Image: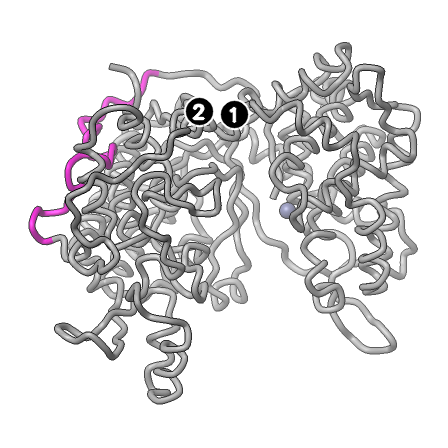
Amino acid sequence: MTSSTTTVSTTRTAPLVLALTVLVLSWAACGPGAPSGTDSAATDSPTDSPTTTEPVIVPDIEERLAWYSPTEISADLTLLTDEDRQVLGLLIEAAGYMDSLFLRQVWQGNPRLRDRVSRLEGEGADAAREYYKINFGPWDRLEEMEPFVGNVEHPEGAGFYPVDMTKEEFERWLDEHPEDREAFESTVTVIRRPPGASDGLVAVRYADEYGIFLGPVADKLREAATATSNASLKRFLTERAEALLSNEYTESDMAWMDLDAPVEVTIGPYETYEDGLFGYKAAFEAFVTVDLPEEGAALERYKAELPWLERNLPIPDEHKNFDRGSESPIRVVDEVLTAGDGRAAVQTLAFNLPNDEEVREAKGSKNVLLRNVMRAKYDKILLPIAERNLVREQVELVSFDAYFNAVLHHELSHGLGPGKITKDGEETEVRKELKELYSTLEEAKADVMGIYNLLALLDKGAIPEGLAQTLRETLEPTYVAGLFRAARFSLGEAHGRGVATQFNYLLEKGALEVDDEGRFRTVSERFPDAIRDLLHEMLMLQATGDYEGTAELLDRYGVATEELQTAIARVQDLPRDIRPIYVDAGEGGE
Ligand code: ZN
């Protein structure tokens, strides 16, 4: 996933007046809907043994807090009716519970340690409390989950398993109790010790483990279902409320794929990254969003060009892929509120759901781009990076429209080019042949193809003139600024090699030049050819399933050269990400 957006005109409207601010700010006491004294999750946390000493705060806590730049996020609500606004208010209430749920999923000891941290005084205490909110726990998500307050080691299995359970114990249990496998590996159960026992394992459904929160969420979703006259939203909300209580999510995930409403919500257990032990367990999150019809229309125009774009790829026809089948839908929305996993630490620019393979097979998956978050990151991070690393006359040639369209076409590009291929007479897939290098190459390919396609659509006259004018002037420098942004945290990692490859290739081909001050300039005369040649190389590696060749390309170009390291060093003190303040959900302001 990359980054970016086109704002036509984000008209600010008055924040919805919601008497829910307290609910939404999940920091409040026990969190929404947690009846005090019933928080069983806080009791099963052997590593958080009560001590008389106060949890110690890392000395650079203020610096770390400054990594996240507080940023107001507002959505374009101008098209919403009174009914839409009422539904939106209910969805915001429902979403608020995801913070409390996720906090417990991160670690069962979280509510108790959070309470202790809330009573801390003295230097760094306020910053530690804020940082706790950002990270949903005492571990720094930008520093490999090292604790920033207290000294509890991060449990790999988060709050999903007993903290003293090892991988081996889990696997041994399944060997001895094969009938438990399905429940144990389910994305929507937690693993616990049987009540009162110190050994043995048992799977507990989310509906039971978290029922105290899920009941009220289901109620809110049903209320919203009653309030809306939109059939697709009514169906999703009804099905999802049912799912939270029955623990059966597939039907409601299907209904989510069909959503088409002015106000939408993605709410429930989704991503499994938080489970560092097995990657089985899904974390609760919510994205409350509003649709942007104008962006949808622009997207439809681009999608109509996809067959032409496939034909236009710089590879022989035999390698082109004209029957990729129905590709996943893309939606462009504004965020009104995120909660839970979706709000922790670094903010997502886009998400692709659901993960349920049954649903993906039946209906594909949906890619949701978050326009106002892209805008915020563009203003707070991409522009300052451009200011430091591009030659002065090109700094002003960076535009949000270019950034947004580059991201949009990055996403569309995942659906173009070789997928299923023939190698040595055998049917196979690019993914299988390129193995662990696949995603690095595929992400870099999508970056490069996104730019190649935009340049091609400009030449074809397929982009409306106003936007076309902007893109002609700003696409190249904006793309390069985006490379610095991406390289900043990923140099040395798989994804960073793909970013470095683009940068170093352009430099070698003279499409990018460095001046005496070490600032970069794109060279328009050479830029399109370099992009085409690089894309050709990448697509041929995919078309032929060439693992060795891919390794060679990444070894040759995907390196942290001195030029790149200097550029990255120059932006090290800039904020690493935004910290959203959702004004339309009643956050911020006094
Ligand atoms: Zn991608």
Q: Nearer the viewer, residue 139 or 331?
A: 139
In the rendered image, which quarter contains the C terminus? top left
Residue at 80% x, 58% y: name it.
Answer: 551
Q: Residues within 10 Å of mark 1 (few under 14, many from 20)?
A: some
> Which residue is the extreme one toward the front?
53
Q: Residues within 10 Å of mark 2 (few under 14, many from 20)?
A: some
* Residue 578 visible from this viewpoint: yes
Per the image, the residue denoted by label 2 is 66
Residue 440 image position (x, y, % from top left): 70, 52
Q: Mainly helix, strand or loop, the magenta region?
A: loop
Residue type at mark 1: give it.
Pro
Is 42 left, or right, of 154 in this rendering? left
Q: Quadrant of residue 120?
A: top left
Q: Nearer the viewer, residue 100 or 154?
A: 154
Q: Is residue 27 magenta?
A: yes
* Residue 465 visible from this viewpoint: no
Is 274 left, or right, of 101 in this rendering? right
Residue 112 image position (x, y, % from top left): 18, 46
What kind of element bears circle 1? loop
First to last magenta residue range: 14-38
In the rendered image, which quarter contains the N terminus? top right
Is 116 left, or right, of 339 in this rendering? left
Per the image, the residue denoted by label 1 is 575
